[in-house]
Image: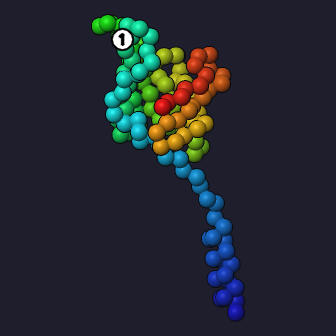
Amino acid sequence: MRITVLILTFLVMVSCSKETKTQNKPAFLIGNWKRLNDKPNFQTYESWNINFKGFGYTKKGTETTFSEQMRIVSINDTLHLEVVGVNDKPTLFKFIEQTDTSFVAENPTHDFPKKLPII
């Protein structure tokens, strides 16, 4: 009888273990992209690898006018877009929405932009 109670107690404890939620990284990003809504005479490009590290740059003619390094990181089971090379320190944008083909990340304390819709 005691063995049965111990086994049942063990099974109940195991079945009540904490469930962790994992969020999938946005696989649609992998590859090379060109921005479609640029200002006239500007072209913006991004390239993402399978490790979810990206590089973006903007050109006006043959001159590069802007560049940044990016990566998707998980912090406390929440995805973030980390941007490096624009400010003194890396800037984090927390994912607030995500589908199979898009995401929205935000950082309300950042001066500009505060929200990044990636579609």
In the depicted view, which residue is nearer to us: 30 or 39? 39
What residue is shown with label 1? 59
Quadrant in which residue 18 is drawn: bottom right
Quadrant into which the N terminus falls: bottom right
In this rendering, would 38 be left or right of 95?
left
Q: Residue furthest left?
A: 62
In this rendering, would 81 be left or right of 1?
left
Q: SS at mark 1?
A: strand
The relative height of residue 94 versus residue 55 in the rendered view (above or below) is: below
Q: Residue furthest bottom?
A: 1
Q: How is the image coloured?
A: rainbow
Instruction: Report the residue at 29% width, 7% height from top.
Output: 62
In the depicted view, which residue is nearer to us: 26 or 94? 26
Instruction: Report the residue at 42% width, 12% height from top.
Output: 66
Residue 19, image x and y in percent?
61, 59
Instruction: Report the residue at 47% width, 23% height from top.
Output: 84
Residue 45, image x and y in percent?
37, 21
The residue carrying pointer 1 sits among few (fewer than 14), some (14 to 19) or many (20 or more) residues within 10 Å by Cα, namely some
In this rendering, would 73 be left or right of 11?
left
- Is residue 65 in view? no
Instruction: Report the residue at 52% width, 16% height from top.
Output: 87
- Is residue 82 in view? yes
Residue 118, image x and y in percent?
49, 30
Hey, what amino acid is under mark 1?
Lys
In the depicted view, which residue is nearer to us: 20 or 103? 103
